Image (cartoon, grey):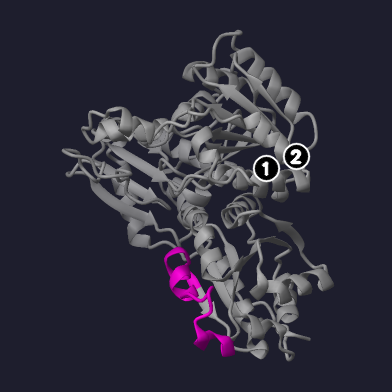
Amino acid sequence: MNGAESLVRTLSGGGVDVCFANPGTSEMQFVDALDRTRLMRCILGLFEGVVTGAADGYARMSGRPAATLLHLAPGLANASANLHNAKKARVPIVNIVGDHALRHQAYDAPLSADVEGAALPFSDFVRITRSAAEIGADGAETLAAAKSAPGRIATLIAPSDTGWDEGGVVAEPRRPQGPARIDSSALDQAVAALAFGKETMILAGDSILEQDETLALLAGIAEKTGCRVALPSANRRIERGRGRANFPKIPFAVDLALEMLKDVRHVILIMARQPVAFFAYPGKPSTLLPDACSRLTLADMHEDGPDAVRQLADRVGARPAKVKDAPRPVDPQAIPIDYLALEAAIAAALPENAIVVDEGLTSGRGIYDATPGAAPMSWIAITGGSIGIGPPMALGAAIACPDRPVVALQADGSAMYTIQALWSQAREGANVTTVIFANGTYEILKQELFRVGANPGRSALDMLEINRPALDFVSIAKGMGVPGVRVSDAAALVRAIRDSVREPGPKLIEATIV
């Protein structure tokens, strides 16, 4: 057995059954081993950012890591933007990155570069394997790191001779680190903070938002104590819609966030960090809580957040709240698609049990608040701010949950970063409906330009608009094997989404925004 086969068998034995790949010469032995063993479903991405974005979406919906197969430092560099998002989301991913053979590394071949240096900023764990005899054990350690709480990016760098040399040994799975218990003194302090009622806010994130039980308990704690509950502005996954407790998110815009938090005197952080501004702006603070607000971490990211919620509820005598559903969305009329009409159309059209992939950015910013009364759904969104996550994340979510419809809410500018994901969706028959919000501009960047006090002229605006020439997403999708349709009124958008989710395979809807 060669090293490559021992690694594939080791990862498979540890539960990895999907590999998203964009391999090159230094990974051919792994391509061969994947083919010979047939232990993993192999999915080709036409760009490395598609590969890592898909692995992110897969992990968010399955709770398990996929493998990625990437080519040397340049391939890893292409993959890094969506590894950044995945690291911020705290999802498990196992990256296998090929490198030149050990004997070849002294010669500065054209693709030679510091693979470890490229991996470190976007990984929680990095291991370089040195022989075919060791690659299986190194793979087992890498997988255990990825599966350790709360979910980690683990990268194994594999020189090509460690894959093709004989002497591979299949390693037994290693035990990942589970979530740590919370500190009892922190629980005492949290109970004391809740005595201040509405002056106290619980900011909860991560796996707490993925369980109906903990969402209902949070609502019960709020009912019992009078405290407020909010969520970070960016989250890995939220279970929401009818029948589930609904909580507001900290707004992206600094002024709106400051207004929301101005009366908070005590904050209890449960698997969440204190809220900070996305960027620094002239004359505005970096931290969004009032200076006088006390900050208490009840459960850090590596600790057991769901258990912290259960213990806190028990201490204050709270029971799961009975959810009072928001009104069901109403179908909009046949009116032009402005931002309000877009929100109404999406909320009305979402099917039962959908997975919503949110990279709507400026155009879609109000959709979350418009959907508490919509059908039950899983909501996954961009976490690290590195745009271009939506199309590949939708692919990965569809691979993880083939029986659920995926609706991707996608800004037009960021779609172009990873539009190649449509081709992979078509090849795999992924059940994804991509709704492109076509406003012909990087609107979010225009707003940022004004926030720093600029008075932009034509040259500045030209760098932020993508309408000369206009992008034709229906034609782009067709060229990648995905049927598409263009709509310009809200009622037509609702019909198009409903028609799309009833049919198998991917579709694209280009919604013209006025």
Question: How far across and how far down the image is residue 50, in percent?
Answer: 60, 52
Q: Which residues are magenta?
A: 102-125
Which residue does the numbered mark 1 point to in the structure image? 422
Q: Left or right: where does residue 163 sit relative to residue 104?
A: right
Q: Amino acid at mark 1?
A: Leu
Q: Amino acid at mark 2?
A: Gly
How many other residues sit within 10 Å of disc 1, few (<14), some (14-19) or many (≥20)?
many
Question: How far across and how far down the image is residue 237, in percent?
Answer: 55, 45
1 or 2: tag closer to the N-terminus = 1
Vertical relation: 194 (above or below) 447:
below
User: Is residue 53 at least partly visible in the picture?
Assistant: yes
Which residue does the numbered mark 2 point to in the structure image? 481
Q: Residue drawn at (27%, 50%), measured in percent from left and top?
A: 295
Q: Left or right: where does residue 17 sit relative to residue 263?
A: right
Question: How far across and how far down the image is residue 448, in percent?
Answer: 31, 35
Question: How far across and how far down the image is residue 151, in percent?
Answer: 53, 61
Provide the secondary structure element on which disc 1 rests. Answer: helix
Q: Nearer the viewer, residue 304 or 234?
A: 234
Q: Nearer the viewer, residue 243 or 402?
A: 402
Q: Residue drawn at (74%, 70%), measured in percent from left and top?
A: 31
